[in-house]
Amino acid sequence: MTETPLEIGMLLYPAFTMLDLVGPLNVFAMHANVHLLSKTLEPVVSDTAGAAIVPTGTLVQCPHKLDVLFVPGGFGTGAAMRDPEILAFLKDAGSRAQYITSVCSGSLLLGAAGLMTGYKATTHWAAHDLLAGVGAVPVKARVVEDRNRFTGGGVTAGIDFGLTLLAKLRGAEAAQAVQLMLEYDPQPPFNAGSPDTAPAGIVQRVREMIQTAPGMSMALETR
Amino acid sequence: MTETPLEIGMLLYPAFTMLDLVGPLNVFAMHANVHLLSKTLEPVVSDTAGAAIVPTGTLVQCPHKLDVLFVPGGFGTGAAMRDPEILAFLKDAGSRAQYITSVCSGSLLLGAAGLMTGYKATTHWAAHDLLAGVGAVPVKARVVEDRNRFTGGGVTAGIDFGLTLLAKLRGAEAAQAVQLMLEYDPQPPFNAGSPDTAPAGIVQRVREMIQTAPGMSMALETR
């Protein structure tokens, strides 16, 4: 890689979803200085089996101008949407970032910071009804691009989101090389990854599981 | 979930690949007690933009009998294959685990511990030639099952691997629910995820990048 590394700031907050973060992280890793930013330098516990990741800097240590500001989703999104320090950080970093981006319920958090007003966006399928409440224009798609906003759908959409944005920033060949490096030739053993294809009983079960989770109910109250 | 949680031990070692670990981690998260095991309790730095994850226990704190022993790959695999403490741990935990599993170059590490002798296995496409050298029977497939060994291909194959193994352990409906929860309805923006479909120039570039990486050359020397 001969180009200047991208400066990417990725927000960490309690009960984010590990794969929301790590899909894009691994896509960008070879092309970026990645800043994993949290309120403190203490490890941040995800919503994923209690796994914790170590921040590389605090919110105030964020580089002045990011190429990409990225927000993952997770069951902690609702609580983060009520955290003034996180919202102030997003407003400030977002005012200068070249691209403002998210995966999963991260777009709701961007919206709570006022960064999605009038922008087309997507989120996890089970949270799609909440997008309009934070000012976004809901679009059902795996990756949604509107001016300098890029949003991805639920969790694993972060890989497709990352490759799409990397192609924009570094060209199709760079993105293809990363796709091959990550052997991203998906072969899901079932056809249940979307509410349009999963059995109805499974859709209902997962919808209830998500909507009764503490983080999501807080997001609902925030509308 | 009313069933007893699975006991899953996931090995951490320096310069593992984050997405190798986190794909399966997120698949198993709601069905398992996940033990992230390392030689010490210090955060383990991955090969992925320097991101570090916090172990939940040391190797000696591993539960006596795991349902699943899991090893991720990464540029640090070669060094781990020469680490007597890691090899001894794998031999010991592997002697009791119900399933012995890996993603990416993790199968080479299992092989170095003597756990793949005579078993069909896969690994990252660019490391496939190394499988026979550690006693495995190489199979080119995204997920390979042979008796109680489950191995996945490179990096993102961990999601397909995880869903396949979860279906085995907890049934197809549980795996489908997780697939829907993770919105795993992949839509790669390019068709470059396999050496069979990527442009030849990209394949060559990635092969050189991987084969000249320090970890991989150590794996080569280990043959």
Image: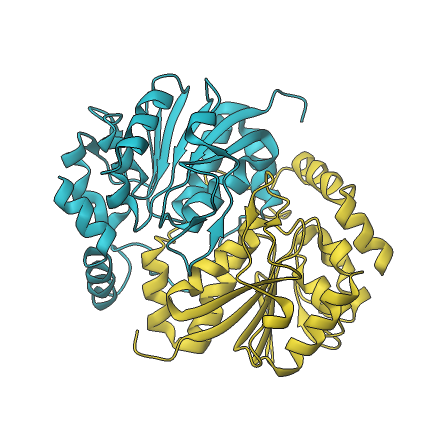
Chain colours: A cyan, B yellow
Please state which of residues A38 and A95 is positioned toward the viewer in this rendering.
A38
Quadrant occupied by the N terminus of chain A: top right
From the viewer's perspective, is residue B175 above or below residue A145?
below
- Does residue B191 show up? no
Q: Quadrant of residue A71?
A: top left
Relative to the observer, which residue lies in front, A58 or B138? A58
Q: Position of residue B49 (x, y in %)?
A: 59, 38
Q: Quadrant of residue B119?
A: bottom right
Tell me what residue is drawn at x 76 percent, y 54 percent: B78
Q: Is residue A65 left or right of residue A191?
A: right
**Where's residue B61, x and y in %?**
59, 71
Name the spot of residue B170 as percent of width and height, x first.
Answer: 40, 76
Q: Residue at position x 22%, y 65% from top?
A: A205
Number of marks in the rendered image: 0
Judge whether A19 appears above or below B164 on screen: above
Taking the image as shown, residue B20 lies to the left or right of residue A81, namely right
In which quadrant will I find the C terminus of chain A? top left
